[in-house]
């Protein structure tokens, strides 16, 4: 996943200095260069690249071209996060990163100002900051050579990604109005479809398996053919979870693969989840669902494993936080005396 940032107030002019009426876009000169640049960005967005604005400007002025300029290709509904103020860009990018809940190494910062590029490079380790040419007409040719946005494939979920992050920002805004977290979670009216793997969800499950890095306990990759085989395996149990709330539908966001290790022990082969649904009680909801399945099948223990990678440190204490006990390099949880955890998500089967 890449978070794409660009200085929107240089689009054939400087909106804060020149005014909307003097912003030149079109088919000639620098205006043509910026128009083509926007078409390219729009294509990236449609492939699932997250677009975010980080502008040093007054918000109403920064948004004006996106709302009112007749020749603009990009509009506000193309942008997942729009941050415009007079604070420094380093702090604003950190704010955007926290809202998106992705690593800086998944972010690319594009800015036509060398000073801003250097400040961001020096203060945000891991972020990619291309050294854009001085001539905007050369931006695209230069960026093509970097292959920063190449992906093997993309899906309908990728196409919807910006919209999903827009709704995530709305949730954060509403959360700030609640004093009690439980009251906020209840207000979301969350629903989750819980089902095993099947021919309809196999492509999305496989995609999550191939791409998920941060919230991925073991980071074992499975192809679509693997997923189809697991769905009918006598030694495996599979679960997939969607999440929908009053702000929108996040689609399929969690994948669980369980393997029968002994008559008493059920091993959590795979637990991966989209980071955009964190802090909504999904971890508790998923564990409750796993334990419920384990009890139905007669297993006395769940066995988990955390296999560290360069990107999944965020889940190193996942099993500890959920009440598992250490057992050598693994984690165990008793199902027969398990107290189902509080959550505010309604299960739909």
Image (cartoon, rainbow, N blue to C red):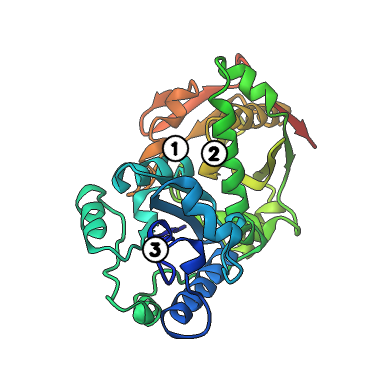
Q: Tell me how far mark 1 sits from mark 3, CA to CA.
A: 53 Å
Judge from the rendering whether residue 16 lies leftward or rightward of residue 237; answer left or right. Answer: left
Q: Which mark is residue 268?
A: 2
The answer to whether 309 is drawn above or below residue 342 in the figure is below
| Residue 217 rendering spot, x and y as whole percentages | 46, 42
Occupied quadrant, residue 261: top right
Between 164 and 252, the one nearer to me in the picture: 164
| Residue 283 rendering spot, x and y as whole percentages | 56, 31
Task: Categorize mark 2 by other alpha carbons within 10 Å: few (<14), some (14-19), many (20+).
Answer: many
Occupied quadrant, residue 254: top right
Q: Which mark is residue 14?
A: 3
Between 131 and 275, the one nearer to me in the picture: 131
| Residue 85 rendering spot, x and y as whole percentages | 39, 43
Q: Disc 3 vs disc 2: which is toward the camera?
A: 3
Q: Residue at x 29, y 44 (%)?
A: 88
- Residue picked out by circle 1: 305
The answer to whether 82 is drawn above or below residue 332 in the figure is below
Q: Mark 2 and mark 1 in contact (Cβ < 8 Å)? A: yes
Task: Categorize mark 3 by other alpha carbons within 10 Å: few (<14), some (14-19), many (20+).
Answer: some
Q: Residue at x 36, y 34 (%)?
A: 329
The answer to whether 344 is drawn above or below residue 83 in the figure is above
């Amino acid at each position: 996943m890449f978070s794409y940032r660009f200085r929107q107030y240089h689009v054939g002019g400087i909106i804060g200095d020149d005014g909307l009426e003097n912003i030149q876009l079109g088919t000639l000169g620098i205006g043509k260069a910026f128009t083509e640049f926007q078409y390219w960005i729009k294509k990236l967005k449609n492939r699932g690249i997250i677009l975010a604005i980080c502008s040093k400007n007054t918000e109403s002025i920064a948004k004006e071209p996106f709302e009112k300029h007749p020749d603009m290709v990009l509009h506000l509904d193309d942008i997942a996060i729009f941050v415009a103020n007079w604070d420094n860009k380093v702090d604003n990018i950190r704010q955007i990163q926290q809202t998106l809940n992705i690593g800086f190494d998944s972010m690319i910062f594009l800015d036509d100002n060398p000073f801003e590029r250097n400040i961001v490079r020096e203060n945000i380790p891991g972020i990619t900051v291309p050294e854009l040419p001085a001539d905007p007409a050369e931006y695209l040719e230069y960026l093509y050579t970097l292959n920063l946005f190449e992906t093997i494939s993309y899906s309908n979920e990728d196409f919807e990604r910006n919209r999903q992050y827009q709704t995530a920002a709305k949730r954060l805004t509403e959360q700030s109005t609640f004093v009690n977290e439980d009251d906020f979670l209840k207000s979301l009216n969350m629903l989750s479809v819980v089902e095993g793997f099947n021919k309809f969800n196999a492509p999305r499950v496989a995609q999550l398996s191939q791409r998920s890095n941060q919230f991925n306990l073991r980071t074992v990759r499975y192809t679509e053919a693997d997923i189809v085989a697991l769905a009918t395996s006598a030694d495996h149990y599979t679960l997939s979870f969607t999440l929908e709330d009053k702000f929108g539908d996040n689609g399929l966001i969690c994948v669980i693969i369980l393997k029968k290790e002994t008559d008493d022990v059920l091993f959590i082969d795979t637990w991966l989840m989209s980071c955009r649904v964190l802090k909504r009680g999904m971890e508790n909801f998923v564990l409750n669902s796993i334990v419920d399945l384990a009890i139905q099948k007669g297993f006395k223990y769940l066995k988990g494993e955390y296999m560290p990678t360069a990107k999944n440190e965020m889940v190193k204490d996942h099993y500890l936080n959920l009440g598992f006990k250490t057992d050598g390099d693994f984690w165990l949880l008793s199902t027969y005396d398990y107290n189902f955890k509080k959550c505010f998500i309604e299960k739909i089967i």
